């Protein structure tokens, strides 16, 4: 890993940069430079064949000045501590910029869950909840799903947590199934939130979204919904991709029909679906690299980190990049995009619809409320439009990129709370 794409070094550079633009008390800066706490747990699990395997799990609690630590749990064979520390830092920034009373955390288990049976996964998840129980809780740390974790795993963990503390406590985790304390709208929230942020930015720039062309890298949960909601706003989705391939449809594809076609065929290739009709003559296959360099108005990286680098940044033709994935643009690529007048809408704002709705789930659990989907979406729209306006105002005031503006705003909110609670 290079210093350009090492996520923790990137996070530290960002903090360092903002500390030169706004006054941050030295003690707070030192506090934000490292996580508050890193918990490592040992997880011995009896496999179905009787063998015992010991897994390692961890939880990084970066900062809780604004509220309980909040962030996902990922189950993956090669997650590194640098990555998790950075993701926890970014959660502190994301919760702050989007103005929810939560701090930043992240965690996971070094495991390939695809190699486990359902019962093994259940035992592992429950043991993890058991070990984390002393350091999590509705007012302490509220984990959520992330890569390879899902509502079912959250349900198992809630069950185990209840056993340890002696009462059912739904608000200890978010991203739960609807029938077990989950929130309406969570599935769509990240993609929908990205569309609200983009549309509000375009409104402030006095640009009409109708007919704008969009390429989306990644056709998973986030990529699909952002494409779907941008199409509804009148944009033309000309390209989407998954880990295997991409497709280009000049007339603009229908995300809904394309998804149905992909699910039926098992691949994107050939799913050139305009309206309700898929026709192999309507489009062509492209690579993920080609997708990034298409001549479109909006480019949406919605798959992985570090996909726009110093190698391809100069070839990006889109004038706006909406970062739906976490960390898709490296630092050196960011400088090239800035020089080329490409507006990058930063991840901590663009994809914050997910954590916003997780907060709504926590809030509903804490207050024994159940909101309708329409209510969730109305709140999300209002919140994301407001914070987008705030970020754009900071951008104007400091004459910086939208990314720097988002960090300035996030760190200002944390600094204000720090001063108010007299932690200095
Ligand atoms: P997902 O697993 O549902 O979808 C990921 C998509 O990326 C899939 O279509 C997959 O095929 C594609 N992909 C994988 N490797 C690829 C590659 N090498 N090239 C191109 N495409 C590739 O995941 P998701 O929930 O949609 O998350 C996508 C991104 O958004 C991640 O960076 C995630 O951290 C971020 N994010 C997700 C949420 C959320 O609520 N799901 C919230 C904030 C940020």
Image (cartoon, rainbow, N blue to C red):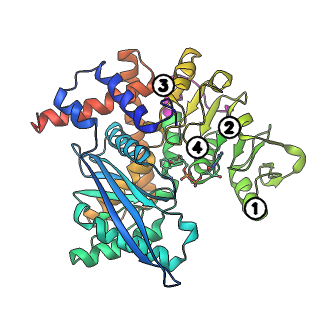
On residue 266, the disc is: 1
On residue 204, the disc is: 3
* Secondary element type, mark 2: strand
In the image, residue 177 sits, relative to residue 299, either above or below, namely below
Instruction: Tell me which residue sits at (53%, 19%) in the image.
Output: 338
Q: Give the range drawn in magenta.
A: 199-214
For residue 213: magenta?
Answer: yes
Instruction: Tell me the distance, in whole angstroms, between the alpha carbons under discs 4 and 2.
Output: 10 Å
Q: Which of marks 4 and 3 is nearer the N terminus?
A: 3
Q: Earlier in the sequence, mark 2 or mark 1?
A: 2
Residue 278 located left or right of residue 127: right
Q: Are marks 2 and 3 in contact (CB under 8 Å)?
A: no
Point out the frontmost of discs 4 and 2.
Answer: 4
Q: Do the residues labelled 4 and 1 touch (CB within 8 Å)?
A: no
Residue 368, by quadrant, is bottom left
Q: Which of marks 4 and 1 is nearer the N terminus?
A: 1
Q: Which of 145 and 88 is in front in this view?
A: 88
Instruction: Tell me the distance, in whole angstroms, between the alpha carbons under discs 4 and 1.
Output: 20 Å
On residue 215, the disc is: 2
Label 4 CB less than 8 angstroms from ligand 1: yes
Q: Which of marks 1 and 3 is nearer the N terminus?
A: 3
Mark 1 crowd level (few <14, some 14–19, many ≥20, 10 Å Cα): few
Residue at which label 4 appears: 302
What is the number of callouts on the image?
A: 4
Residue 248 coordinates in the image, percent (x, y): 78, 40
Instruction: Tell me the distance, in whole angstroms, between the alpha carbons under discs 2 and 1.
Output: 21 Å
* Secondary element type, mark 3: helix
Point out the frontmost of discs 4 and 3.
Answer: 4
Q: Nearer the viewer, residue 276 or 104?
A: 104
């Amino acid at each position: 890993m290079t210093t350009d794409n090492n996520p923790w070094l990137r996070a530290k550079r960002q903090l360092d940069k903002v500390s030169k633009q706004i006054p941050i008390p030295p003690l707070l800066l030192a506090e934000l430079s490292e996580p508050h706490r890193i918990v490592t747990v040992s997880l011995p699990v009896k496999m179905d064949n009787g063998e015992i395997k010991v897994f390692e799990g961890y939880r990084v609690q970066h900062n809780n000045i604004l509220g309980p630590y909040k962030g996902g749990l990922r189950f993956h064979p090669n997650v590194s501590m640098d990555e998790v520390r950075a993701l926890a830092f970014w959660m502190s920034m994301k919760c702050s910029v989007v103005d929810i009373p939560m701090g930043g955390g992240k965690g996971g288990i070094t495991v390939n869950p695809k190699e486990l049976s359902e019962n093994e996964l259940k035992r592992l998840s429950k043991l993890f909840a058991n070990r984390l129980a002393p350091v999590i809780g509705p007012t302490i740390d509220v984990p959520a799903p992330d890569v390879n974790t899902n509502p079912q795993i959250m349900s198992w963990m809630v069950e185990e947590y209840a056993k340890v503390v002696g009462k059912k406590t739904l608000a200890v985790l978010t991203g739960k199934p609807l029938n077990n304390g989950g929130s309406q709208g969570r599935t769509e929230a990240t993609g929908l939130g990205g569309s609200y942020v983009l549309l509000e930015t375009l409104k402030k720039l006095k640009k009409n979204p109708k007919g704008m062309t969009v390429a989306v890298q990644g056709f998973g949960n986030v990529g699909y919904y952002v494409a779907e909601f941008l199409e509804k706003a009148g944009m033309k989705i000309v390209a989407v991709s998954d880990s295997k391939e991409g497709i280009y449809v000049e007339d603009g594809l229908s995300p809904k029909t394309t998804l149905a076609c992909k699910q039926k065929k098992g691949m994107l290739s050939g799913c050139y679906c305009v309206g309700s009709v898929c026709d192999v003559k309507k489009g062509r296959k492209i690579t993920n690299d080609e997708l990034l360099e298409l001549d479109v108005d909006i480019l949406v990286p919605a798959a992985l980190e570090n996909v726009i680098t110093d190698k391809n940044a100069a070839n990006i033709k889109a004038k706006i990049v909406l970062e739906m994935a976490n960390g898709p643009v490296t630092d050196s690529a960011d400088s090239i995009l800035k020089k080329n007048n490409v507006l990058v809408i930063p991840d901590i704002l663009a994809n914050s619809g997910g954590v916003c709705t997780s907060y709504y789930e926590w809030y509903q659990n804490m207050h024994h409320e159940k909101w309708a989907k329409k209510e969730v979406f109305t709140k999300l729209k209002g919140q994301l439009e407001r914070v987008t306006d705030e970020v754009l105002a900071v951008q104007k005031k400091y004459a910086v990129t939208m990314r720097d503006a988002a960090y300035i705003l996030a760190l200002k909110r944390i600094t204000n709370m720090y001063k108010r609670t007299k932690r200095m």
